[in-house]
Amino acid sequence: MLIDKNDTQMRSLKIIKIAAIFPIVILMATCKPTEKKPMLPSVTGLPGDLAIVIDKSDWDTRPGEEIRKIFEEPVQVLPQYEPLYDLMFVPHSAFNSVLQPFRNILKVNIDGKYKDPKVVVQNEVYSKSQILFNLYAKDDSAFVKLINDNKGKILALLEDAERNRLTEHFKNNLNERIFNSLKDKYNITLYVPREYKTNIDSGDFVWLYHEIGAVTLGIFVYEYSYTDTNTFTPGYLIEKRNSLLKKYVQGEVEGSYMTTETLFGPVFNQYLLRGKHYVAELKGLWRMEKGVSMGGPFISITTLDEKRNKIITVEGFVFAAGEDKRSYLRQVEAIVLSLEILDNQR
C-alpha cells in the first residue's frame, strides 16, 4: 500500500476541410423569443467509448482497418497495452434514437457523390457534451487519405471532449477545502473532486490521494523559486521531481521512495495550456526505489508564476496493479490540466 495514513504540443496538420458547427447556437438564433430550447439528454456510453457509424462492407475492408489502426493505438506510457478508444461498430441502418445520444461518434460516409472530401465536427447534436464527426469521401482511397490527414486533430478534439466532461464533473463535485487551500497557499486553482484527501501538506509540497479499492490515484503540487534558465528541460524537471519524491513520498519499507522510471522515457512536451500559460509536460512511468515492486503511469506539468517568480508543478499518478489504467490516467490528467495560475499577486 502506497499511502501513508500517518501523515501534444499539437502539431500543424494539413487539413482538407474541417468545420465546427454548434447546433445549440443555431437553434437559439432561429427560435422565437417565447420558444424554449429543447433539453438534451445526457450522453450514453462509457468514457473512452467511440461509436463508428459505417456500412459493414466498409467496416470489414480498408476504411475499417484504417479506423482501427488509428483509434486502437496504445495509450502512451501505460505499462501494458490499452487502446486509445474502445470501438463500437454501428451500421448506418442501426443508428437510431437509442444510439444517437452516444458520447463520441464518428460517422463514415463513402459515396461517389462526395466529390470534395471533408470532415465536419458537430457538438451536442443529440446529447449534452456529445462530439460527432462526419467524414465524407467519394471512395475508399479518398477516405483513407482524409482520415490520416486529419487524425491528429480528430484525436485532439476527442481527448478534449473526454477531459471537459471530467472537468465539469469535478467542478460539480469539488473538494472546496482543498480548492481553497491551494488557492491561498499556491496562488492556483485546481479542480480536485470531493473524494480526495490530503496526505501531506508541508508548505511547498502537497500530496492528495483517492483510493478506489486497491487502486490509488494521487495528485502532487509543489513549488520552488525560479532561479535557473534550464528549469524547463527534461533533465532538470526529472532531477527536481526525484529529489522531492525521495523526501516526501516514501513507501512502507524503510528506505524506499517513489522515483521516475527513465528506462522508458518519460515523454517531454511543451505547449500553451488553454492558449495562455506555457507548460512543460512530462508523461511517463514511476516506480518505487527499493522495497516492494510498485509502479504506474504519471503526468506532470510545470509552469511559471511570473508575479511570484515561482515554479509550479502539478502532477497526477496512478497505482492500479493488475488493473486497466487508461480511465484512471485520464481522470488524474483532467485534474492536472485544470490548473490555473491566479493573476492577482498575494
Image (cartoon, grey):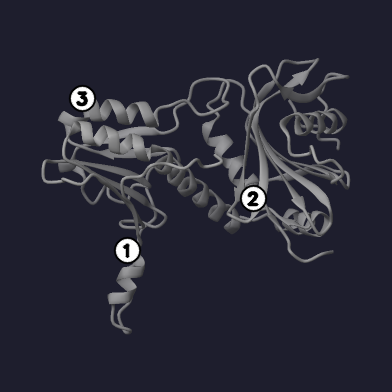
Image position of 80 with respect to 232: above or below: above
Give the camera-side residue of 282 and 271. Answer: 271
The numbered disc on residue 193 is 2
Q: Amino acid at mark 1?
A: Pro
Residue at the (31%, 49%) spot, across then down: 17
- Left or right, 89 with respect to 231, comes to left
Q: Amino acid at mark 3?
A: Thr
Compute the Cα span from label 2 to label 1. Answer: 31 Å
Residue at the (82%, 33%) spot, across then down: 240
Give the camera-side residue of 6 and 344. Answer: 344
Image position of 285 with respect to 155: above or below: above
Residue topped by disc 1: 23
Residue 86: x %, y % from top left:
39, 32
The numbered disc on residue 61 is 3
Q: Earlier in the sequence, mark 1 or mark 3?
A: 1
Compute the Cα span from label 3 to label 2. Answer: 44 Å
Compute the Cα span from label 1 to label 3. Answer: 33 Å
Q: Earlier in the sequence, mark 2 or mark 1?
A: 1
